[in-house]
Image (cartoon, helix red, strand yellow):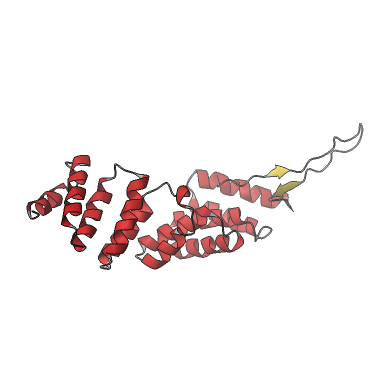
Amino acid sequence: MEIALEPAAQAAPAAGAGAAEVQITVGGKKISKETAAAIEAGNQAMAAKNWAGARESYVKALAELPDNAPLLQRVAAAYLGEGNVDEALRYAHQVTEKDPQDTTAWMMIAEVELQRGNLEAGRAALEKIPPDKVTNPQPYLNIGILAINAKKPEEAVPAFDRAIAIKPDLPDAYYYRGLARMQLKKNAEAKADFQKALELAPDGPDAKDIRDLLKTMP
């Protein structure tokens, strides 16, 4: 996400006239030089992965731009970088209140909630994002794993289907879909998934478990 600082268009000063003051705007709103400097400092700190420094600078800029969704998202990202998940979520939700179409904020919410084991909250956030905008299979993989753990294999399989659609060579997705299909007593389909997982990663971390499972299957 990029926050652009755009000087307002200025007419060239007449000969002998004093230099015209340059107006700095963000999202069409005029801001002070101090706020512009705070945003720039935040951007530099963010690029350097100085999360605390970035957050401090962006929060300072919020004094003039409390409703700026991209700036709120930057604060959320900085908090997440610091490991302060609660504040990251709080600001990400503020972003979605200002701009319900902000896919970056919804993705952050989905990923954090799923990592916390909150299946319904994570899935609800992910559903706010158009499917073609989700290019990372991990959230769907997490949904499927949580659904398996919750003994909901019928919900897990479609999630793994989505993960595979995004990344067809992801061995974990086939392995876990196989486990879900085993729970559903669909052994033939499960066996095919396990074999595909082995084909993709014959020496992967789950390879031994998969081979042991296949030995028990007709």
Q: Is residue 186 above or below residue 172?
A: below
Question: Residue 175: where, in percent of width, then height?
Answer: 22, 51
The answer to whether one can see residue 78 in this image is no
Give me the residue at 49% from left, 49% from top.
50
* In this view, 178 is above or below 44: below
In the rendered view, does 153 fall on the left or right side of 45?
Answer: left
**Which residue is at the front of the view, 29 or 122?**
122
Of 116 and 48, nearer the camera is: 116
Q: Please give the count of numbered marks on the rendered protein.
A: 0
Residue 5 in the image, given as x and y percentages of width and height: 67, 45
Query: Residue 112 at x, y = what percent?
Result: 41, 60
- Residue 75 position in % (x across, y down): 54, 56
Q: Nearer the viewer, residue 148 or 105?
A: 148
* Direction from residue 67 to residue 121 in the image, left or right: left
Q: Is residue 207 above or below residue 97?
A: above
Q: Is residue 63 left or right of residue 192?
A: right
- Give me the residue at 44% from left, 58% from top: 126
Residue 199 shows in the view = yes
Q: Residue furthest top?
A: 15
